[in-house]
Image (tube, rainbow, N blue to C red):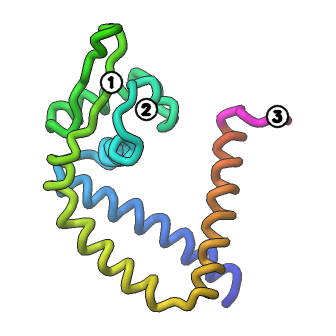
């Protein structure tokens, strides 16, 4: 396989993944951004708005807008800590999220598992190594662009 063809397909994969997640979000009545950050909450559990802003890269003001929209759709709730009412935890509504997203992701997971099972262990190791390395490249580039790396 030619490198240029591989690069083109890699770009197409990422673009297709973004488009699919936008379609999933739209089906659920969300924006792609709101769906993405709801996913962070589901994956990591309850956290403060500041913590969500930090892992998302958004400002706390932008995250407040995301939380407001998710709360309006009853996908998260704000929980005030009894020991410090200034601190607010954002709690994902896993039950509602599951009702909305489970049917979609069930089919996606089934099809993905079928695809993965068509590869040998050796092939999977190569794909895994590619993704691990690509993730590292993207993380380093993000850090560089955000000024978090030393020159």
User: Which circle, 3 or 2, is nearer the viewer?
Assistant: 2
Q: Position of residue 89 (x, y in %)?
A: 33, 24
Instruction: Using the numbered discs, state the Cα–Cα distance from disc 3 to disc 2 in whole angstroms.
Output: 25 Å
Q: Which residue is mark 3?
A: 150
The residue located at (47%, 32%) in the rendering is 58
Disc 3 secondary structure class:
loop
Q: Gap in Å between the C-alphas at discs 1 and 3?
A: 33 Å
Judge from the rendering whether residue 37 lies leftward or rightward of residue 96; answer left or right: right
Which residue matches tag 1? Answer: 89
Q: Please give the name of the residue rendered at 31% of the width and 29% of the height, measured from the top-left corner.
A: 90
The residue positioned farthest toward the right in the image shown: 151
Q: Is residue 98 above or below residue 113?
A: above
Q: Nearer the viewer, residue 80 or 64?
A: 80
Residue 75's place in the image compared with 87, above or below, is: below
In the image, residue 20 lies in the stretch drawn in magenta: no
Locate residue 116: give its quadrant: bottom left
Give whichever of 150, 14 is nearer the camera: 150
User: Which badge, 3 or 2, comes first in the chain's sequence?
Assistant: 2
In the image, 56 versus 94, the foreground residue is 94
SS under mark 2: helix
Dots 1, 3 in contact, CB < 8 A? no
Task: Point out the stretch of residues depicted in magenta.
Answer: 146-150
x and y percentages locating residue 41 in the rendered image? 35, 40
């Amino acid at each position: 396989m030619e490198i240029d063809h591989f690069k083109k397909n890699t770009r197409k994969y990422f673009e297709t993944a973004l488009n699919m997640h936008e379609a999933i979000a739209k089906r659920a009545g969300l924006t792609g951004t709101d769906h993405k950050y709801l996913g962070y909450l589901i994956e990591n559990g309850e956290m403060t708005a500041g913590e969500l802003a930090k892992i998302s890269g958004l400002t706390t003001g932008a995250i407040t807008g995301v939380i407001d929209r998710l709360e309006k759709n009853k996908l998260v709730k704000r929980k005030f800590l009894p020991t410090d009412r200034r601190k607010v935890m954002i709690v994902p509504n896993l039950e509602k999220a599951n009702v909305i997203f489970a049917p979609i992701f069930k089919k996606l997971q089934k099809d993905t598992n079928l695809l993965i099972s068509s590869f040998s262990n050796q092939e999977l190791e190569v794909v895994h190594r590619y993704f691990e390395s690509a993730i590292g490249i993207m993380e380093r580039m993000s850090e560089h662009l955000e000024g978090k790396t030393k020159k």
